[in-house]
Amino acid sequence: MAGFYESSAPLLWIWVGGVAILGVALLYGVIRAGWLKPRERAQIDRATRAQQQADDPQKRSGMR
């Protein structure tokens, strides 16, 4: 039984390293997803306003 643990220990460290790398990559993606450049945010805001005006007839006629 001791031979099994001796041969599997390096594989465990490779597995732990892979999990750590994946975790760091996911964390970076989650953090980066919340950050928009001012130009990107303005573009999204313009598109949102245009879509809302197209969907809402009161906004099209100028009424609020």
Image: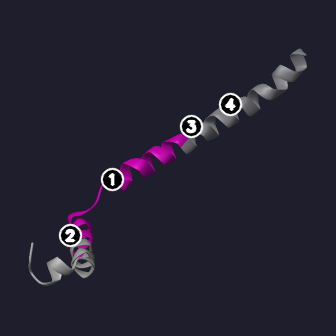
Query: What residue is pinned by disc 3?
Result: 20
Quadrant in which residue 27 is drawn: top left
Crowding at dot 2, Cα within 10 Å, few <14 / some 14-19 / many 20+, comes out as few
Residue type at tag 1: Gly
1 is higher (above) or lower (below) than 21:
above
Crowding at dot 3, Cα within 10 Å, few <14 / some 14-19 / many 20+, comes out as few
Residue type at tag 2: Ala
Do the numbered discs 4 and 2 sit on residues whose CB atoms are within 8 Å?
no
User: Which of the two discs, 1 and 4, labels the residue nearer the N terminus?
Assistant: 4
Residue shown at 21% from the left, 74% from the top: 49
Of badges 2 and 3, the one in the foreground is 2
Do the numbered discs 3 and 4 sit on residues whose CB atoms are within 8 Å?
no
Label 1, secondary structure: give it.
loop
User: Which of the two discs, 2 and 1, labels the residue nearer the N terminus?
Assistant: 1
Query: What residue is pinned by disc 1?
Result: 34
C-alpha gap between disc 4 and disc 2: 46 Å
Q: Nearer the viewer, residue 43 or 11?
A: 43
Query: What residue is pinned by disc 4?
Result: 13
Measuring from the top left, give residue 54's x and y in whole percent.
25, 81
C-alpha gap between disc 3 and disc 1: 22 Å
User: Which of the two discs, 2 and 3, labels the residue nearer the N terminus?
Assistant: 3
Does the stretch in magenta take in 35? yes
Residue type at tag 3: Ala
Residue shown at 26% from the left, 72% from the top: 48
29 is higher (above) or lower (below) than 52:
above
Span colored in magenta: 23-46
Label 3, secondary structure: give it.
helix
C-alpha gap between disc 1 and disc 4: 32 Å
